[in-house]
Image: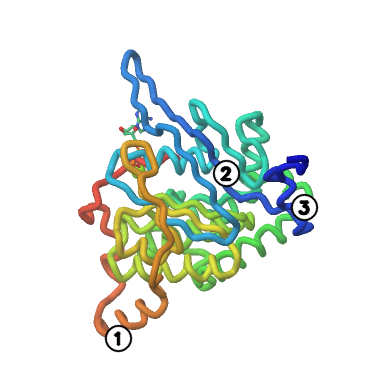
Amino acid sequence: MGIAMSSPLSAEVGTGTVTPPVIDIRHLVKIYSSGANKVHALRSVDLLVQRGEMVAIMGASGSGKSTLMNILGCLDVPTSGTYLLDGVHVEHLTRNELADLRNQKLGFVFQGFNLLARTSALDNVLLPLVYDRKRKRKRRGAQLQELAEAALRRVRLGDRLDHHPSQLSGGQQQRVAIARALVTEPQVLLADEPTGNLDTRTSIELMALFQELNAQGITIVLVTHEPDIAQYAKRIVEVRDGRIRRDRPVEGRRDAAADFTRLGADNMDDDDAGDAHAGDGHGVEVSAA
Ligand code: ADP
Ligand code: MG
């Protein structure tokens, strides 16, 4: 023998830079207890996500997808196991540190959009900046407003700044929510059934936006139970009964922008009305606020 085995760390030395996975989850367990009842929502989940990936998490209702997303999003903490977000051990952080980390690294998009109703698109998108203690110290109001406008332009809503959610279609509301998630320039965008309340055409349009953002370098993890939607991701992770059952790259990944253009040509007289279907057959879920 005599020759030391190379450790996982030394393997990275040769490359000069060490880029940890942006998400590194090991042996993650989540047990909800209400009284005597215990629900094992996650039973030892391991998940590594590298920078630049676009992952679709699939699974039946109740399989633990939202529980996993809420932990990934630092909205909830695991019962046991470890979570490193961009190399930082999340479980050792205080509430404030966790909030700062979430604000710096993550953007979250929900099925139900979760916009403030009597508030303009611009003010909805400004909100995370107002709560961002570090950024606020450095920037003035006008600069914050410019960042929010830029985020809305990025989702092609630069002409809807003053519109309230009720004046926007479902697809537009979800794009405001994405702008709100983007305004802090996160590394990772987490989306829990972002197309769950949208019709097929609007869903594909939204997936084109996600693919575009991913191509710009943002890591995306999204939950969907629609196989067609998952085909726009680069990788599909299947969850069942709180465990990852399958994890595979997407072969023949689809181009959502091309699909959307094709659909548009087939349905020239399709209008925007009825964009949002709350009861679209997807079932209504309560997402964490
Ligand atoms: P999915 O998003 O895949 O539908 P969830 O993560 O929401 O699944 O739920 C996984 C399991 O955990 C389900 O059995 C669900 O009833 C349970 N569960 C989810 N949230 C809670 C909670 N806050 N309290 C108790 N049980 C919960
Ligand atoms: Mg869910």
Q: Which of 210 and 13 is in front in this view?
A: 13
Is residue 285 toward the left or the right of residue 174 in the image? left
Residue 15, horizontal then vertical, whole percent:
75, 59
Is residue 274 toward the left or the right of residue 172 in the image? left
Q: What residue type is labelled 3?
A: Val
Q: Real-space Cα distance between discs 3 and 2?
A: 19 Å
Q: Pointer 1: residues within 10 angstroms few (<14), some, or many (20+)?
A: few
Q: Real-space Cα distance between discs 3 and 1?
A: 52 Å
CB under 8 Å between discs 3 and 1:
no
- Looking at the rendered structure, the secondary structure element under dot 2 is strand
Q: What residue type is labelled 2?
A: Asp
Q: Which residue is drawn at 46% across and 49% down?
A: 116
Q: Which amino acid does label 1 sit on?
A: Ala
Q: Nearer the viewer, residue 162 or 103?
A: 103
- Mark 1 and mark 2 lie on one chain; the one further toward the N terminus is 2
Instruction: State the quadrant of the C terminus.
Output: top left
Question: Which residue is disc 2 drawn over?
Answer: 24
Q: Pointer 3: residues within 10 angstroms few (<14), some, or many (20+)?
A: few
Residue 96, horizontal then vertical, whole percent:
66, 33
- Looking at the rendered structure, the secondary structure element under dot 1 is helix
Residue 112 visible here: no
CB under 8 Å between discs 3 and 2:
no
Question: Which residue is disc 3 drawn over?
Answer: 13
- Mark 3 and mark 1 lie on one chain; the one further toward the N terminus is 3
What label sits on residue 265 in the rendered view?
1
Q: In which quarter of the image is residue 123?
A: bottom right
Residue 2, horizontal then vertical, whole percent:
77, 40
Q: Is mark 2 within 8 Å of ligand 1?
A: no
Q: Is mark 1 within 8 Å of ligand 2?
A: no
